[in-house]
Image (spheres, coloured by chain):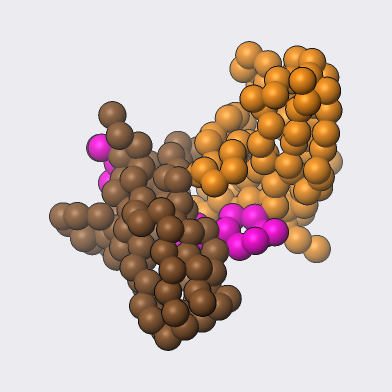
Chain colours: A orange, B brown
Amino acid sequence: QKEVEQDPGPLSVPEGAIVSLNCTYSNSAFQYFMWYRQYSRKGPELLMYTYSSGNKEDGRFTAQVDKSSKYISLFIRDSQPSDSATYLCAMTSNQAGTALIFGKGTTLSVSS
Amino acid sequence: NAGVMQNPRHLVRRRGQEARLRCSPMKGHSHVYWYRQLPEEGLKFMVYLQKENIIDESGMPKERFSAEFPKEGPSILRIQQVVRGDSAAYFCASSPQGSNYGYTFGSGTRLTVV
């Protein structure tokens, strides 16, 4: 079993839809959870960061962590064509600069 | 305020040649991380460095790969005697201190081995 599983998609939605992106993981020691957005031929850009369980909201984006189920989600409300990108979940167990474990990424396409 | 600068953006090497990838961290950042992204794969950690010090190289292949972050100048990821399987996008990230959420990634170097 891989440490982090993420459905690669592709996921296609119309503009204005609510998008749900998910990752599951196997390592119960993970405490820090992140979502990155990566446009084609660009580096990943940090979108959301969450520590332990709970929800975090930032504009149209909401990150949820359910440690009991080892499941994290990113919701995008009112999706826009500019949201079309690959979304990567990442996580780690230690704050002091240890490696991030990434999912493979989900490719999202939002059509106008 | 420049971000993380990587060069070259694209690099083509013949099998057996050496590849040198450079990364200049953001101003004020003294910690550098290298990741590799293979086609259809996620980002994989390679190495974590501070100035003049390798902190964690658990993701580096045992042979042909090395990294440094000298007191002056950029961090260098060096791949000797490249093989086709080394073709990938190599990303550098930096942070002001040891962090697992404050990463800023560069745009990457795309290495093609022919």
Vertical placement of B77 versus A31: above or below? below
Which quadrant, please, contains the N terminus of chain A? bottom right
- Based on the displayed image, in which of its 4 quarters is residue A68 positioned? top right
Left or right for B51, reference A24: left
In the shown orientation, is residue A69 left or right of residue A47? right
**Residue at image x 55%, y 78%?**
B84
> Residue at the spot x=78%, y=48% of the render?
A8
Q: Residue furthest left?
A: B72
Evaluate whether residue B3 shows in this view. Answer: yes
The part of the image, by quadrant, that contains residue A62 is top right
Q: Residue at x 62, y 45 (%)?
A: A91
Q: Quadrant of the C terminus of chain A?
A: top right
Q: Residue drawn 45% across and 51% down?
A: B108
Q: Indicate the position of residue A103 as horizontal and vertical percent values.
A: 69, 50
Quadrant in the picture for residue B87:
bottom right
Q: Which residues are magenta?
A: B27-47
Q: Percent position (x, y) of residue B63?
A: 45, 83
Above or below, A60 relative to B12: above
